[in-house]
Image (cartoon, rainbow, N blue to C red):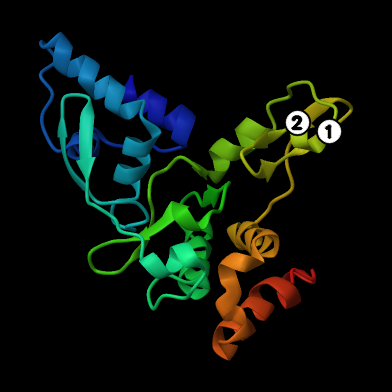
Amino acid sequence: MVKMHLLLNYNVTLEDNVLKRLINNEVDENEPTQIKDFWNLFNDNDFVMTKLFEDEAILPTMLGTCGSMFVTEHLHTPFEIRNGFTHKHLNFQTIYEYVLRLDMLNPDPVKICKVRLDYFSLSADNRVKARNARYLMLESQLLKELASGKSCWYDTDCHWFDCIGSCVKNKCIKPPRQSNVQQLCQYVHMNPEQFRYFRAQDEMRILYEYACKRKYRKNYW
């Protein structure tokens, strides 16, 4: 049942031994409570995404489970970020590299559908990670979500957070492919006060102009 759930909802096929490793312990099929806890965990998008991409470290590291709950490492947000200043390990460049990496994950890219500075934090070894999987979805999942065929009037009726599909003949159909970098560029454009250091740091500003202005030929500033 869990294997079918992962296949249908995450486009992932796992062998039994791999499936057991995801939860880090054996499940007694004769214990209804354990089976229920196991099922609840695999219906939690945070848990599934964290475990599926554990090696890529895009989300807080899983420390353990207890029943249907799980514990992850603590992430911290530098004080400077909350006040529009740059930080050595959390800035436009490191966030750009993070969202770019999501687009390159195999076998299914991960799409970020809402970019906010307070959604990103640092691990103890100063790696950028999303705080949780709330705004993350596998590309194949997202296409199903946005191209569900539901009734609509506008493109914005076909959305999952800030990922927008296409409304054609009053139905949501397959959306245009939009990269995670474009989501980041749009956020910077809408919130310039949070990136004031662009004006003082040539290297960061040049990267921004390459990533957002030149590549997508939009005047984001």
Please determine whether, in this image, residue 114 is positioned above or below residue 186.
above
Please tell me which residue lies in front, 203 or 53.
Answer: 203
Tag 2 and tag 1, C-beta contact below 8 Å: yes
| Residue 127 sits in quarter | bottom left
Query: In the image, is 74 to the left or to the right of 4?
Result: left
Q: Where is residue 164 in the image (x, y as percent from the top left)?
A: 71, 42
| Residue 178 sits in quarter | bottom right
| Circle 1 crowding by C-alpha within 10 Å: few under 14, some 14–19, many from 20 | some
Quadrant location of the C terminus in the rendered image:
bottom right
Residue placed at 85% from the left, 27% from the top? 153
Please tell me which residue lies in front, 110 or 3.
Answer: 110
Question: Can residue 106 be seen in the rendering of this structure?
Answer: no
Residue placed at 72% from the left, 33% from the top? 158
Q: Where is residue 209 in the image (x, y as percent from the top left)?
A: 68, 79
Q: Is mark 2 on a helix, strand or loop?
A: helix
Quadrant location of the N terminus in the rendered image:
top left
Question: Can residue 24 be seen in the rendering of this structure?
Answer: yes
| Circle 2 crowding by C-alpha within 10 Å: few under 14, some 14–19, many from 20 | some
Residue placed at 56% from the left, 45% from the top? 139
Give the amino acid at mark 1: Tyr
Query: In the image, is 202 to the left or to the right of 63?
Result: right
Q: Mark 2 points at which residue?
A: 157
Q: Where is residue 121 in the image (x, y as percent from the top left)?
A: 37, 59
Please tell me which residue lies in front, 211 or 21.
Answer: 211
Q: What element carries label 1?
A: loop
Residue at the farthest front position:
83
Q: Name the residue under label 1.
A: 154
Q: Distance between the residues labelled 2 and 1?
A: 5 Å
Query: In the image, is 110 to the left or to the right of 178?
Result: left
Q: Position of residue 210 (x, y in %)?
A: 67, 79
How many labels were placed on the picture? 2
